[in-house]
Amino acid sequence: MSGEQSDRPGRAGRTGDPRGRSQGRRGSSQGQRGQSASGAPQPRDAQQRGAQRTGPQRTGPQRTVQPARRVAYDVLRAVSESDAYANLVLPPAIAEARLNPQDAALATELAYGTLRRRGTYDAIISAAADRPAEEIDPAVLDALRLATHQLLATRVASHAAVNESVNLVAAAQGRGASSFANAVLRRISRETPGEWEQRIEDSARSDDERLALRSAHPVWVIRALRRALAAEGRADELDDLLDADNASPEVTLVALPGLAEPGEPRRPYAPTAYGSPGGDPHRVISESGGTVRVQDEGSQLVALALAEAAPIAAGERWLDLCAGPGGKTALLASIAREHDVTLEANEVVPTRARLVRNALRAVPGDVVVHEEDGRSFGASHSGVFDRILVDAPCTGLGALRRRPEARWRKSPADVAELVPLQVELLRSALDALAPGGIVAYATCSPHLAETTGVVQEVLRGRSDITELDARAVVSGISESPIDLGTDGSGRVQLWPHRHGTDAMFLALLQRTATEPSGANAEEGD
């Protein structure tokens, strides 16, 4: 195996530092970057980061590596080095490599599967290497993660997984590093997945840490999900939820009302939703001219609920306050077009505002896209909108099955940073409502601080806002019975394991009167 004489890992896995620590960036990003759609401007935009680079500059001789594995490795490196998002860099990488459908599917499984279970694989690699994973050079570590996924979670032949991953290391870091990688992978390949699972679980310091290693979720995420389920009296569903997060989601399409008809197979809840025939949606999307596009069924239900929360009157004025990248905006625009309603959108990040405009091209008519700070939008547009969607920037814990790297990027500090922004955005939206107007507050996170906590904070001390029964609205929209747990309120929390959707949260708030002058003075301090 690549000339390795011993199966004991050497020191070559550590490069650039005599103490054995890598000088390269590690694939852990603290804080929320590029997702504060219409809140405070962010230092870098996620779309730009993902598009700039799909892998590191390689050094040394190029070794033979199957194209699908090369693409998967380059995606892992982009995520680790550039904080890229896999769902943004993988499709162009597949296209550039001209992979056939079978190899494209393999590259997708290798990249997503490796990213999804990174924490578990790092524990295994640490045990096999006799050193913490964070002390291994990032380029070597990504190759080890990729090979570990193939060895323990796929039917890829062991020799192919090991040899080609060793070649990836040799091409990126040289012969010494490849010898280290070879030794580590030989150790991993000698034990079964069950044996490795038992070994790393035996090293856990608590039941939650043991569950974290088994389910490949950080401990803090497990605890947040458990609390959210417990609020519905369903904490016993935690294992099912964690399993659902680790399953590849089916592709769901939206047919924009009045512009396209949903095909088959139909999804159970949103009347606009259906599954992608054959799994690859690109042909259907292209042929539709943009009137059909990929959109999670939960996201569709959120937009539809705002439209169905009360009878629509011609001449209403609607707003999507945090519009980027524009999927929900396009759905609202198609509904508004059918009812003689004016829709506007707002997105503070210019590159994401362009995505919103692109998303709206398929919908006839003009939609003004503002580029203002959503937190102050209500003050400059006070009392003028009849319906407002606040799809707030959030941790994205509800979309872990579609954004596998997100679970390793987030921390409790991100929640603490985002909640004040979410509160400000919702307050701004309520200020922009006309009397009788309705706000739909939504997040793609079930974290209680980002959902019910935000709603309760904003409602505190306001006498001009009434909370509507969002559960009744969504149940009325649904094409079949929908099991919506309840925490005693009328709010909706969707779940991957229960509904097959992202874990979208929804609250509907209606302004019943004009807010008395100065009523929120203390809250704004």
Image (cartoon, grey):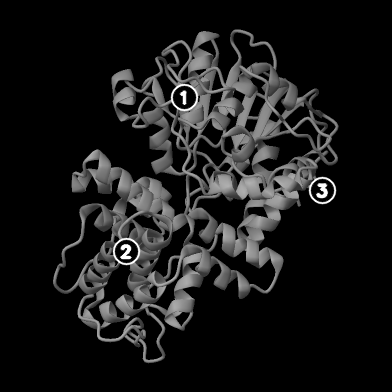
Q: Residue at x 57, y 68 (%)?
A: 198
Number of numbered discs on residues: 3
Which label's residue is closer to the chain start, 2 or 3?
Answer: 2
Residue contact at pointers 3 and 1, CB within 8 angstroms: no
Q: Which residue is mark 2?
A: 158
Name the kind of residue labelled 3 in the image.
Glu
Query: Picture quarter containing residue 298?
Result: top right
Q: Secondary structure at mark 3?
A: loop
- Name the kind of residue labelled 1 in the image: Ala
- Which residue is identified by label 3? 522
- Residue name at image x 78 percent, y 30 percent: 490
10 Å neighbourhood of mark 3: few (<14), some, or many (≥20)? Answer: few
Mark 1, residue position: 330
Outermost left residue: 61
**Vertical position of residue 367 compared to residue 91: above or below:** above
Mark closer to the chain start, 3 or 1? 1
Residue closest to the eye, 91 or 313: 91
Q: Earlier in the sequence, mark 2 or mark 1?
A: 2
Marks 3 and 1, Cα distance to the nearest angstrom? Answer: 37 Å
Q: Is residue 422 left or right of residue 28?
A: right
Direction from residue 456 to residue 355 in the image, left or right? left
Residue 265: x, y in percent? 46, 20
Q: Position of residue 482 (x, y in %)?
A: 67, 25
Q: Which kind of residue does numbered mark 2 sit on?
A: Ser
